[in-house]
Image: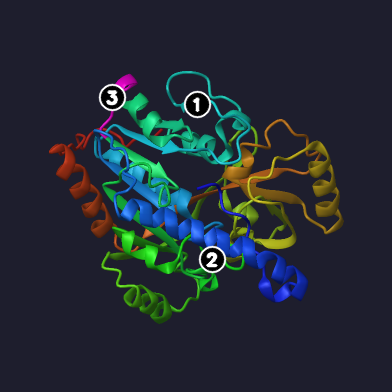
Amino acid sequence: MPWPMPAVNPDALSPARRAALYVPAKLYELGARMRMALYETAYLKPKSLAKPVISVGNITAGGTGKTPLVEYIARYLTDEGYETVVLTRGYGRQSAARVALNDGQPAPSWKLAGDEPLMLARRLPDVKIIVDADRHASGRFAETTYGCDAFVLDDGFQHFQLQRDLDILVLDATDPFGNGELLPFGRLREPLYALRRAGAIVVTRTDRAFDQEYLLGVLAACEVAAPVFFAYHDIVGVHELGSRRPQAQRMLVGQPIGAFSALGRPVVFEDDLANLGANVVFAKRFPDHHAYAAQDIAALVAAAKAAGATRLVTTEKDAVKLEGFAFGDLPVSVVEIKAKLEDEVGLKSLLLRTIVRKTGKYYRKPASEPPSGAS
């Protein structure tokens, strides 16, 4: 299935525009249902890899906090001693060629690898990231070229072509089901009954106000038997754009800053900054995966200064596309975000059982050995 068409707000549409979108919307729904049925009836069969595959994905379009969870899982499995490889398609990149990151070769441009894969590679220096639309082929490549113990499949909930050993579905607590409508009128990529495919559900952003009774009620109505874990994201560090030199988080507290990002849910990033105590006097939202140009930066700097900002702040996903641009005398800081789970033991136990069930191997690094990525 191609990347879904963007959701629109049906209430903001004219009757003519609403009518024009009706047929494409129904065709999208028909295609999604037929594709699910072909795999559910085994008319089409997924391909398998020799090593266990743990998928992390969404049922809605837009940001749900999926990438920090991919990092969390890959880091944990690596720290447990499993040679872990992340398989991702690298949405938004300007190349179709397979790219391997953290394989001992110089990292390519984000234009070849994609912004999220390059960000993950920097966050997970001990984990190989394979970027390829064909995740089975890239998995076989990793098995034969590097050898590995486990795969983490990024954005894999709709990637039926590859057999998964554990399907983790990520829901945003503040908008879990995108008003219940499929694209383009809502944010759902699939009908709600697809929730039953999940082997585990991780509800992110639970540090914000949300209707837990409604969320759990929908899961129950859809007969979802998977365990539900609650998570949130936390700002764990700040560094300087370009040099990546660490900075103190307190330098943002009370300061007039300009926030900018190209995310699926930019308001979450801006709220995180406000909750940290930053005085966000200016916010600029670019389309998700936006490729920045010099004119974007010039206009951004001018608008931020006019609003009284003394510093710009962005995300790690954006930072990989911004190095090399000149921001004049306006400093730029990058915030680092990690996923935090309320029931870490439960999710980690599920991950380990999945690995051991297929491989029969249980690894644990010596306690004296530092965790992966430690300095």
- Look at discs 2 and 3 and give the one toward the viewer: 2
Q: Is residue 93 shown left or right of residue 48?
A: right
Q: Position of residue 184 (x, y in %)?
A: 61, 63
Callout 1 secondary element: strand
* Mark before the other along the chain sequence, 1 or 2: 1
Q: Position of residue 267 (x, y in %)?
A: 63, 63
Q: Residue at x 59, y 55 (%)?
A: 250
Q: Which residue is mark 2?
A: 182
Residue 373 makes an appearance in the image: no
Q: Does the magenta stretch mainly form a helix, a strand or a loop?
A: loop
Q: What amino acid type is highlighted by mark number 2?
A: Leu
In the image, is residue 161 above or below residue 19? above
- Region rendered in magenta: 144-149
Where residue 45 sits, quadrant-wise, is top left
Crowding at mark 2 (Cα within 10 Å: few <14, some 14-19, many 20+)? many
Q: Residues within 10 Å of mark 3 (few under 14, many from 20)?
A: some
Q: Label 2, label 3: how many angstroms apart (C-alpha)?
A: 40 Å
Q: Is residue 304 left or right of residue 96?
A: right
- Tell me the residue that label 3 is attached to: 147
Q: Which residue type carries mark 1?
A: Val
Q: Which residue is mark 1?
A: 99
Report, in whole angstroms, how far the alpha carbon at label 1 lies from the one at label 2.
32 Å
Tell me what residue is drawn at x 54 percent, y 73 percent.
179
